[in-house]
Every structure is written in structure tokens, then in C-alpha cells.
């Protein structure tokens, strides 16, 4: 693990490495997070 200075954390967006977010997958992850097995 490495320490990261707070000023290195970007808050201006444009940090998502994906071309698009699959909303169905997000919904599935959200459901599983809220309803663990």
C-alpha cells in the first residue's frame, strides 16, 4: 500500500476508465450490496 497526498486526488471528473457504464450491472451490484446472501 502507498500513501497518496490528498492534492493528487482528482475531483474534476474524467477519471472513469470505461467507455460506458453498464447500468444493468450497476443495478445488479446495488441489489447484491443491499441484499447480501
Image (spheres, helix red, strand yellow):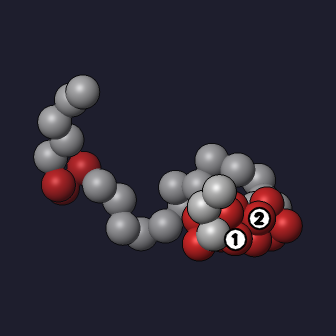
Q: Is residue 16 depicted above or below 33 in this figure?
A: above
Residues at badges 2 and 1 in contact (C-beta under 8 Å)?
yes
Looking at the image, which residue is at 76% across and 64% down? 28
Q: Position of residue 6 (x, y in %)?
A: 17, 55
Looking at the image, which residue is at 18% across and 55% down? 7
Mark 1 highlights which residue?
31
Residue 14, disc: none
Q: Crowding at label 1, few (<14), some or many (≥20) Cα neighbours within 10 Å?
A: few
Q: Is residue 28 left or right of residue 2?
A: right
> Which residue is nearer to you in this view: 7 or 28?
28
Q: Position of residue 3 (x, y in %)?
A: 16, 36
Q: Crowding at label 2, few (<14), some or many (≥20) Cα neighbours within 10 Å?
A: few
Q: Is residue 14 left or right of residue 3?
A: right
| Displayed quadrant of residue 32 | bottom right
| Displayed quadrant of residue 36 | bottom right
Residue 28, disc: 2
SS at circle 2: helix
Give the quadrant of the C terminus. Answer: bottom right
Q: Is residue 21 depicted above or below 1 in this figure?
A: below
Looking at the image, which residue is at 35% across and 59% down? 10
Asked if residue 26 can be seen in this view, the reply is no
Amino acid at each position: 500500500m502507498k500513501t497518496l497526498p490528498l492534492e493528487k486526488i482528482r475531483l474534476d471528473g474524467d477519471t472513469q476508465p470505461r467507455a460506458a457504464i453498464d447500468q444493468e450491472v450497476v443495478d445488479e451490484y446495488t441489489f447484491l450490496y443491499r441484499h447480501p446472501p
